[in-house]
Amino acid sequence: MTISGFKIICLDEVDSTNNVALQLSSGIGGQKKVIQAKRQTAGRGRWGRIWHSTEGNLFFSVLLEFPLQQLGKLIMTAALSLLETIKQYNPQSDVCLKWPNDVLLNGAKISGILLEKGAGEYMIVGIGVNIVHHPSSIDMLYPATSLKEAGIQTTSEDFLQKYMSLFVCNIKRSAADLRQGWLKNVRGLGTEIMVKQNGEERRGIFQGIDENADLLLRIGDRTQKILAGDVFYTGEK
């Protein structure tokens, strides 16, 4: 099966779709692929965290050639396409973005994105979406939810098709245009946030992101650029 120029490879069980994509990235000569699995035995998120991979949810990796120096554009494309996919099911959904690459639905995490480098010019965009299940918040750094819990009925296959159509359209947009779309949909712009990174905490005013999708945090009269970390809003952890 092919969706928007990407060949879809559907597998029953893998350790991680990103691992499969990494193996495939050598010697496929510019082909574009999506690796989807019904189950993952070793799904992972950022910082090596476990991604709970319950059957019925969606786990897939997009494999494409993409300039590493434009990584910010790929990050914005992946996240914005997820938000827009959810809005296709319910335009009134309370859905927003959370830096660096999360999507929140009704204030809880609905998905995760993990970008990794493949062979040669290949980039891998690993994505998990909670379609019908979500892990207990006790097990999570941030509260989680599912589309089903939010009243959205769909299947992983239907969601993937809608997502890839939007992804292909968005990847053609300029980085500046994507950045504006991202900023319109991010939670907490202009408010105080806390960023946790390597055991340290920094509080400041969320000023948005730059063209590389790095976070801009104003602390006092200075704006700092943050490349990685976990964001929490006022009143959270």
Image (tube, rainbow, N blue to C red):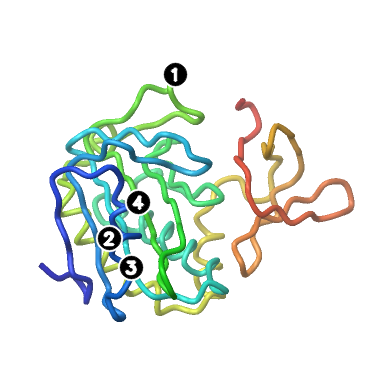
Q: In this view, does 137 lie above or below 48?
A: above
**Disc 1 from disc 3: Cα separation:** 36 Å
Q: Where is residue 228 in the image (x, y as percent from the top left)?
A: 63, 49
Crowd class of label 2 (few under 14; some 14 to 19; many from 20; radius 10 Å): many
**Disc 4 from disc 1: Cα separation:** 22 Å
* Residue ID for mark 2: 163
Crowd class of label 1 (few under 14; some 14 to 19; many from 20; radius 10 Å): few
Callout 3, which amino acid? Ser
**Disc 3 from disc 4: Cα separation:** 17 Å
Mark with earlier residue (1, 2) = 1
Q: In this view, does 205 lie above or below 142?
A: below
* Residue ID for mark 1: 138
Q: Nearer the viewer, mark 3 or mark 2?
A: 3
Mark with earlier residue (3, 4) = 3
Residue depicted at 52% across the width and 47% down the height: 98
Callout 1, which amino acid? Ile
* Residue ID for mark 4: 127
Q: Where is residue 32 in the image (x, y as percent from the top left)?
A: 27, 73
Mark with earlier residue (2, 4) = 4
Q: Between residues 146 and 36, which one lies in front from this camera angle?
A: 36
Q: Where is residue 122 in the image (x, y as percent from the top left)?
A: 40, 71
Q: Residue 25 carries which label?
A: 3
Q: Where is residue 126 in the image (x, y as percent from the top left)?
A: 36, 54
Q: Is mark 2 on a helix, strand or loop?
A: helix
**Disc 2 from disc 4: Cα separation:** 11 Å
Mark with earlier residue (3, 2) = 3
Determine whether, in the image, residue 219 is placed left or right of residue 201.
Answer: right
Crowd class of label 4 (few under 14; some 14 to 19; many from 20; radius 10 Å): many
Callout 2, which amino acid? Tyr
As drawn, the residue found furthest toward the left would be 1
